[in-house]
Image (cartoon, rainbow, N blue to C red):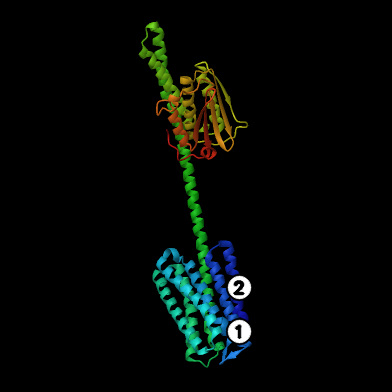
C-alpha cells in the first residue's frame, strides 16, 4: 500500500477542491465528485485501520473490514457514476444510455446495503468474497462498455472521463484479479494497484474539471458578448425607428397639414364670396377638412417621441378636452394627479388612451345635454381615468346598443390595454377606465384599434 498520508492527503485535497469549485460554479458534478472522493477516502482509511489493528478475525478474514469496506467502495462507485453522468451531460446528450446507467447506479446502492446486511448475518467469508469479486468484475465490464460508447462519440469531455475511468477500472481489476490468482498475497501487496489507479484518475478528472470550468466561462462570456451585440443592434434599430417616426410626423404636418388647411381656407373663402347661397356640400367639405386636420394632428402627436411620457400625455389631453368642449360651450374641469410621475409611455398606448377619452367626450356632446364635465386622473395601484358629465345620462337603449355609440370602441381599447371600463348612471353618466400600471411600462403587444 502507498503511504497513508500520501493517498489520504491527496483525496482530502480533492474533496476541498471540489467543494470550492461547487461554491463558485454551482454545478452538480462537483458535489458528486466530492462525495466520491470522501467515500473512496473512507474506503482506504478502513483498509489501513483493518491491516494495522483488526479487532476480530473469523476464518482468517477481518470482520472490521468486511462490514464496511466492500459496501463503502460500491457507494463510492455510485457517486462516481453520478459524477460521470453530470460531467458529460448524459441526461441530454445520451438519454437512453443515461437511463441504463442510472438503473445500474441504483443497483450498486442496493448491493452495498445488501452486502452490509449479509456480512453481518453470515460468517461464510469465502462465499462473500466470491460474490464481491463477481459483482466487482461485472461492474468493471459494464464500465468498459460505457467507455466504449464515449470513445465512439469522442468529445473532449468524453476523453477526460474515459482516461480517468480507465485508470480506476484497470486498477480495480488488477486488485481483484491478483487477489484471486495470488490468494497468499495480502491487501498491502494488491491494493496498491487500485490506489495508483485512483491517483491517476484524480489527475485526469481534475484536468477535465478545470477544462470544463474554463470552457463554461468562455461560453458565458461569448453569450454575454452576443447579447451585448444584440442590445447594441436593437438600440441602433430603436434610434432608427424613432428618427423615422420624427420624419413621418414632420412630413405629415408639413405636407398633408398644409394641404388640408389650404382646402379649408379656400372653402371658407368660397363661402364668403357666395354669401348665403353656398351649398351644403361646400359646408361638408369645410367640416371634413377641419376633422382631417384634427385627426392628422392626433397622429402626429402619437408619433412624436418627445411626447412618450405621462406628463406630456396628460398635458395634451387636458388641452384637447378643454378646447373641444369649449366649442360647444361646455365647461371642462380636469384634475391631474399630484405629483405627476414621469412614466415613460409608448406612442401606441398614449393613442389608445386618448381615443378612449375622445370617444367619451363625443358621446357627452351627443347625448348628455350638460354644461359641465369633470375629468380626473389618478395613479395608485392602477392608472384611473374618471369622466363625469353631470347631465341627463346615457339612455338605456343606447347603453346596451351593440354598435354605433362608441361604447364598444372604448371597451375594446380598454381591453387592448389589459384594463376595463365601467359605466355608472347617477346624476349624469360617469365612465371609469382602469388600466394596470404595467401596461404603461410595456411598449409591445399592442395593436392599433
Badge 2: residue crowd in 10 Å (few <14, some 14–19, many ≥20) = few
Where disc 2 sits, the SS reads helix
Residue at x 49% of width, y 46% of height: 231
- Image quadrant in which the C terminus is located: top left
In this view of the protein, which residue sits in the foreground, 323 or 301? 323
In the rendered view, would you say 415 is above or below 158? above
* Residue pointed to by mark 1: 48
User: Which numbered disc, 1 or 2, marks the residue closer to the eye?
Assistant: 1
Residue 253 in sight from this viewpoint: no
Image quadrant assignment for residue 44: bottom right
Looking at the image, residue 50 sits to the left or right of residue 220; the answer is right
Element on which disc 1 rests? helix
Give residue 80's position: percent from left, percent from top: 51, 73
Name the quadrant of the N terminus. bottom right
Q: Which residue corresponds to the image point at 40% horizontal and 69% vertical from the top-left?
A: 153
Residue 340, percent across and down? 60, 32
Write down the residue under mark 2: 13
Is 39 above or below relative to 365?
Answer: below
Distance from Cα at disc 1 to Cα at disc 2 = 19 Å
Q: Position of residue 214 (x, y in %)?
A: 52, 63
**73 or 237, nearer to the observer:** 73
The label on residue 87 is: none
Q: Position of residue 343 (x, y in %)?
A: 56, 36
Please report the residue visible at 58 percent of the width from the left and 75 percent of the height from the top: 11
Q: Residues within 10 Å of mark 1 (few under 14, many from 20)?
A: some
In this view, 380 is above or below 181: above
Amino acid at each position: 500500500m502507498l503511504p497513508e498520508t500520501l493517498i489520504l492527503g491527496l483525496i482530502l485535497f480533492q474533496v476541498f477542491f471540489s467543494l470550492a469549485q461547487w461554491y463558485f460554479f454551482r454545478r452538480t458534478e462537483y458535489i458528486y465528485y466530492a462525495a466520491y472522493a470522501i467515500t473512496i477516502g473512507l474506503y482506504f482509511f478502513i483498509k489501513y485501520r483493518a491491516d494495522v489493528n483488526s479487532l476480530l478475525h473469523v476464518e482468517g478474514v477481518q470482520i472490521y473490514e468486511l462490514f464496511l469496506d466492500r459496501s463503502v467502495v460500491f457507494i463510492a462507485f455510485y457517486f462516481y457514476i453520478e459524477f460521470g453522468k453530470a460531467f458529460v451531460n448524459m441526461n441530454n446528450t445520451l438519454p437512453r444510455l443515461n437511463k441504463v446507467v442510472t438503473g445500474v447506479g441504483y443497483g450498486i446502492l442496493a448491493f452495498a446495503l445488501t452486502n452490509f446486511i449479509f456480512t453481518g448475518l453470515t460468517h461464510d467469508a469465502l462465499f462473500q468474497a466470491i460474490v464481491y469479486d463477481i459483482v466487482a468484475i461485472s461492474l468493471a465490464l459494464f464500465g468498459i462498455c460505457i467507455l466504449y460508447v464515449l470513445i465512439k462519440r469522442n468529445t473532449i469531455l468524453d476523453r477526460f472521463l474515459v482516461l480517468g475511468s480507465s485508470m480506476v477500472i484497470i486498477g480495480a481489476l488488477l486488485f481483484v484479479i491478483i487477489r484471486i490468482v495470488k490468494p497468499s498475497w495480502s491487501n498491502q501487496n494488491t491494493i496498491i494497484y487500485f490506489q495508483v489507479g485512483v491517483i491517476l484518475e484524480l489527475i485526469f478528472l481534475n484536468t477535465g474539471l478545470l477544462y470544463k470550468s474554463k470552457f463554461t466561462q468562455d461560453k458565458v462570456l461569448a453569450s454575454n458578448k452576443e447579447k451585448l451585440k444584440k442590445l447594441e443592434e436593437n438600440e441602433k434599430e430603436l434610434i432608427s425607428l424613432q428618427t423615422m417616426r420624427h420624419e413621418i410626423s414632420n412630413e405629415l404636418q408639413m405636407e398633408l397639414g398644409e394641404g388640408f388647411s389650404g382646402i379649408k381656407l379656400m372653402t371658407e373663402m368660397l363661402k364668403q364670396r357666395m354669401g348665403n347661397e353656398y351649398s351644403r356640400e361646400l359646408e361638408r367639405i369645410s367640416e371634413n377638412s377641419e376633422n382631417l386636420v384634427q385627426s392628422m394632428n392626433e397622429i402626429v402627436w402619437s408619433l412624436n417621441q418627445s411626447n412618450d411620457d405621462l406628463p406630456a400625455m396628460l398635458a395634451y389631453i387636458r388641452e384637447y378636452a378643454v378646447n373641444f368642449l369649449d366649442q360647444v360651450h361646455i365647461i371642462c374641469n380636469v384634475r391631474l394627479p399630484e405629483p405627476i410621475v414621469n412614466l415613460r409611455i409608448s406612442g401606441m398606448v398614449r393613442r389608445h388612451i386618448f381615443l378612449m377619452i375622445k370617444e367619451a367626450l363625443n358621446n357627452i356632446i351627443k347625448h348628455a345635454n350638460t354644461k359641465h364635465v369633470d375629468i380626473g386622473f389618478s395613479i395608485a395601484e392602477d392608472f384611473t381615468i374618471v369622466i363625469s358629465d353631470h347631465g341627463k345620462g346615457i339612455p338605456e337603449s343606447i347603453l346596451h346598443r351593440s354598435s354605433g355609440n362608441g361604447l364598444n370602441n372604448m371597451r375594446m381599447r380598454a381591453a387592448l390595454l389589459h384594463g376595463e371600463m365601467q359605466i355608472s348612471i347617477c346624476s349624469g353618466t360617469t365612465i371609469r377606465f382602469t388600466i394596470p400600471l404595467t401596461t404603461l411600462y410595456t411598449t409591445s403587444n399592442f395593436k392599433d384599434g
